[in-house]
Image (cartoon, coloured by chain):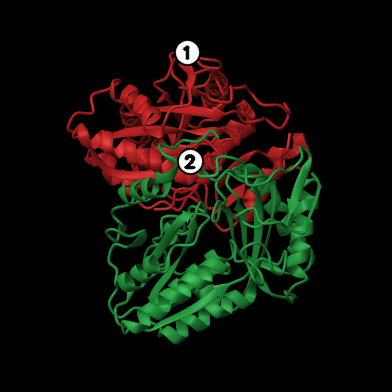
Chain colours: A red, B green
């Protein structure tokens, strides 16, 4: 394993330290926790937004903490859910009396631990609601997941719920907006090469030299099939077709996210986007806004995912709202 | 070679197409050229700022085109300087009568071709000035370079010259600000694994399984030495010590850029930043602002570079100025 580390069991601790040191003007770490919060949290009169999950997906989720997005990100060990007590700390750090919405990616560990934290918080008198993101159309049920997995489309949930919360909406309204995004966002990914979890010291899976895995999860969970390496246009077409088959995008406007998994050059992501745009154009689907880059990674996995969010006027306005988050500045 | 491509000889063309499609609200491609320009270029009454170089360093340089940074980026083939006629197109697309400043990274090909373009532009009556960035303290003279190489510190030149140009400064004033940045910025990098240039089809260089190269260039040019893999703190200390030995940073304020070379997880970059901050703190050097992420890559090379810019009040104000560039939004 060839990585820039000091100690495999200190990676998360040292990353958090480096992160808050780098961005101390906008975020803070809640002492003795793995919670990254807005510097001004809790924000008076505003619904608190808390997300998080295992680390290794940077810039998710700490990079999405900031005015107009998340109030806190709770960080677990690499590819491991944060514990309920840490999530509880995130809730407590962000509740200003207006309640807290938990944005959870659909993995069994996350769902269980965030649920338990919600119960603990309710017992302390904090109103907590939650939404579960399951945008990955690749497979039903998977390693670590019952139902569909939550992947890069989660970033749109953070952004839009964040804007709605910032506008002073109630907890019920913020939750409804988040659920609307979840209902309208679909994603799918592909991997060319595995990543290596530091504590494991060896690649999470192995692909042959000319093989890619269509529908991979962000922890290397199995996808739909392993096929010989195809052209960028062919792979992209497979992913986009599967997404478009899932809900009706006819005559709609969409936001597009072409997300690098960690080690894919931006050059290749733009080549992918070119084909996404071509396919959507041919189907009469209008692109409202596009993001291309690394938003939900899997350490140094090589590959990418595509997310499409079907928009209405409310979602467009929220998507355009100001965000001060480090990794999603608008 | 396992890459997401359609054709190795179309990568730049398709990337440019994907880039302008993704960001059509803020940039445009000058027809029949490899020039990415601000959508509103040329901007009346403003000095034009043109940079560029070989592709493969994304988000450099197209990602730095936008209000408050570059007016145009001229893109060459992978790791290959753009031709003089393309640079000339970039100059012509951005000159509003106030003259154009070329920001050139110190590689023989770039210097020669941008020089030639400047002469051609002058012959057409456009006033052109240029600055050459040589921030890499690793080695004097190298493959493709006489003197020191220009690497990630170049991004600070774009940002600060961009802010000064946006303020309505004259060509001489913008050039003076860019030169002040060049005088005060130093960088150095390390590689763990090589990248593969699509047209070459094989890695640019080979390192042993436990070996890293200290002082590598962004095209894989040789560094100072190959050493066994060390801890993040040890590698970081080596790079920072060499940077600090080059100019006097005593009692100064600095901007820090920890730049991923392409395939290094953000997690590791924050672990590096942690040590950078610790070392600077011990020396009484105050960090004014920090950037951690991928700013000047080498395709999917694994490794990182550190840049330190010594600041004064003018540089701080310019660093803080608004930027609409896709990859450097402030």
Residue B89 position, x and y percent, is 33, 68
Q: Is residue B280 left or right of residue A180?
A: right
Crowding around mark 2 (Cα neighbors within 10 Å: few <14, some 14 to 19, many 20+) is many
Q: Chain of mark 2?
A: A
Residues at discs 2 and 1 in contact (Cβ within 8 Å): no
In the image, residue B262 above or below residue A121: below
Residue A88 showing in the rendered view:
yes
Q: Chain of mark 1?
A: A
Residue beneath disc 2:
A295
Residue B180 badge: none
Image spot of residue B267 (x, y percent): 64, 42
Q: What residue lies at 47% left-to-right and 13% top-to-bottom?
A: A141
Q: Which quadrant of the view contains residue B281?
A: bottom right
Which residue appears at 64% of the width and 53% of the height?
Answer: B220
Indicate the position of residue A138 as horizontal and vertical percent values.
Answer: 42, 19
Q: Residue at x 57, y 33 (%)?
A: A301
Residue A121 seen anywhere in this rendered image of the structure: no
User: Mark 1: few, some, or many residues within 10 Å (few <14, many ≥20)?
Assistant: few
Circle 1 is placed at which residue position? A141
The picture places residue B309, in percent across and down from the top left corner, at 63, 70
> Relative to A129, is B138 on the left or the right?
right
In the displayed structure, would residue B117 be above or below residue A79? below
Label located before the other in sequence (2 or 1): 1
Q: Which image quarter holds the N terminus of chain A?
A: top right
Query: Across the whole image, how many numbered discs are drawn on residues?
Result: 2
Q: Secondary structure at mark 2?
A: loop
Q: Considering only vertical position in the picture, is A205 above or below A13?
A: above
């Amino acid at each position: 394993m060839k990585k820039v580390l000091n100690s495999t069991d200190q990676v998360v601790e040292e990353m958090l330290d480096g992160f808050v040191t780098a961005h101390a003007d906008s975020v803070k770490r809640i002492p003795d926790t793995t919670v990254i919060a807005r510097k001004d949290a809790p924000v008076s009169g505003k619904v608190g937004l808390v997300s998080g999950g295992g680390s290794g997906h940077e810039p998710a989720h700490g990079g999405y903490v900031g005015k107009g997005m998340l109030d806190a990100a709770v960080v677990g060990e690499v590819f491991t859910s944060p514990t309920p007590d840490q999530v509880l700390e995130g809730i407590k750090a962000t509740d200003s009396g207006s309640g807290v919405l938990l944005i959870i990616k659909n993995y069994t560990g996350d769902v269980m631990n965030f649920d338990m934290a919600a119960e603990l918080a309710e017992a302390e008198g904090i109103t907590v609601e939650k939404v579960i993101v399951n945008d990955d159309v690749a497979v039903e049920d998977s390693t670590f997941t019952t139902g569909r997995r939550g992947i890069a489309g989660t970033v749109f949930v953070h952004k839009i719920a964040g804007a709605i919360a910032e506008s002073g909406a109630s907890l019920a309204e913020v939750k409804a907006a988040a659920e609307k995004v979840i209902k309208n966002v679909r994603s799918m990914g592909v991997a060319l090469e595995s990543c290596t979890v530091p504590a494991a010291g060896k690649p999470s899976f192995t692909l042959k030299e000319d093989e890619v895995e269509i529908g991979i999860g962000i922890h290397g969970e199995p996808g739909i099939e392993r096929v010989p390496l195809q052209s960028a246009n062919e792979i992209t077409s497979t992913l986009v077709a599967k997404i478009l088959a899932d809900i009706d995008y006819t005559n709609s406007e969409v936001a597009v996210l072409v997300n690098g998994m960690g080690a894919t050059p931006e050059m290749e992501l733009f080549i992918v986007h070119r084909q996404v745009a071509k396919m959507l154009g041919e189907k009469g689907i209008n692109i409202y806004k596009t993001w291309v880059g690394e938003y939900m990674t899997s350490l140094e996995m090589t590959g990418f995912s595509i997310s499409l969010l079907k928009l209405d006027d409310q979602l467009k306005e929220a998507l355009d709202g100001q965000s001060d988050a480090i990794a999603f500045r608008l």
